[in-house]
């Protein structure tokens, strides 16, 4: 099931899809908070992380810029305009983009590690060399450890 790599088009398409879902969720949640909605960047960092985990660094960067644009358009005053806000909001947006780049790098590294581990596991499963399986073929190291820890050896007389 997981032995094929994710196609490039799907890895890139995850960025706008995850940002769209995060924006939709944020638009649905904001009215519940009344006149004091939470941070405009709420939920969008998760979209960046998901994009970088699945797609890698560049889809994470794409999600970062899409999330920054969506935040500026939907959540920062004046709403429904791009780059027409105060200096403080522009600084917050720049910090968000920098944070998104860091999250993209960390997420891409984590995703690469997960994929490498998966590939090693698949290669070991397909290998003709039998693996150590522990006690009586259980395949579990902790069962082997539990079995060994129950054996008592008497001191030499």
Image (cartoon, helix red, strand yellow):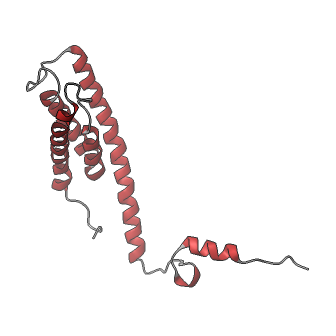
Tell me what residue is drawn at x 42 percent, y 77 percent: 127
Rendering coords of residue 48 (x, y %): 26, 42
Tell me what residue is drawn at x 25 percent, y 16 percent: 88
Q: Is residue 71 above or below residue 12?
A: above
Tell me what residue is drawn at x 15 percent, y 42 percent: 24
Farthest residue to the right: give it: 157
Q: Is residue 79 above or below residue 22?
A: above
Rendering coords of residue 81 (x, y %): 8, 24
Tell me what residue is drawn at x 22 percent, y 14 percent: 87
- Considering depth in this image, is 16 or 125 the residue closer to the camera? 16
User: From the image, which quarter does the N terminus lie in?
Assistant: bottom left
Rendering coords of residue 150 (x, y %): 69, 75
- Considering depth in this image, is 99 or 8 the residue closer to the camera? 99
Farthest residue to the top: give it: 87
Farthest residue to the left: give it: 80
Q: Is residue 6 above or below residue 26?
A: below
Tell me: 27 left or right of 1: left
User: From the image, which quarter does the C terminus lie in?
Assistant: bottom right
Rendering coords of residue 66 (x, y %): 17, 37
Tell me: 84 left or right of 40: left
- Considering depth in this image, is 88 or 121 the residue closer to the camera? 88
Location of residue 27 (image quadrant):
top left
């Amino acid at each position: 099931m997981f032995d094929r790599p994710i196609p490039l088009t799907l890895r890139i398409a995850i960025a706008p899809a995850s940002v769209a879902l995060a924006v939709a969720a944020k638009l649905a949640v904001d009215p519940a908070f009344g006149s004091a909605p939470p941070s405009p960047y709420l939920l969008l960092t998760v979209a960046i992380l998901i994009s970088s985990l699945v797609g890698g660094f560049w889809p994470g960067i794409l999600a970062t810029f899409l999330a920054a644009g969506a935040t500026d358009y939907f959540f920062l005053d004046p709403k429904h305009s791009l780059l027409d806000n105060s200096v403080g909001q522009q600084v917050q947006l720049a910090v968000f983009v920098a944070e998104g780049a860091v999250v993209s790098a960390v997420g891409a590294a984590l995703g690469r590690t997960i994929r490498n581990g998966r590939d090693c596991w698949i290669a070991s499963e397909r290998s003709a060399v039998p693996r150590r399986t522990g006690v009586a073929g259980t395949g579990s190291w902790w069962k082997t450890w539990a079995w060994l820890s129950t054996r008592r050896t008497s001191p030499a007389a």
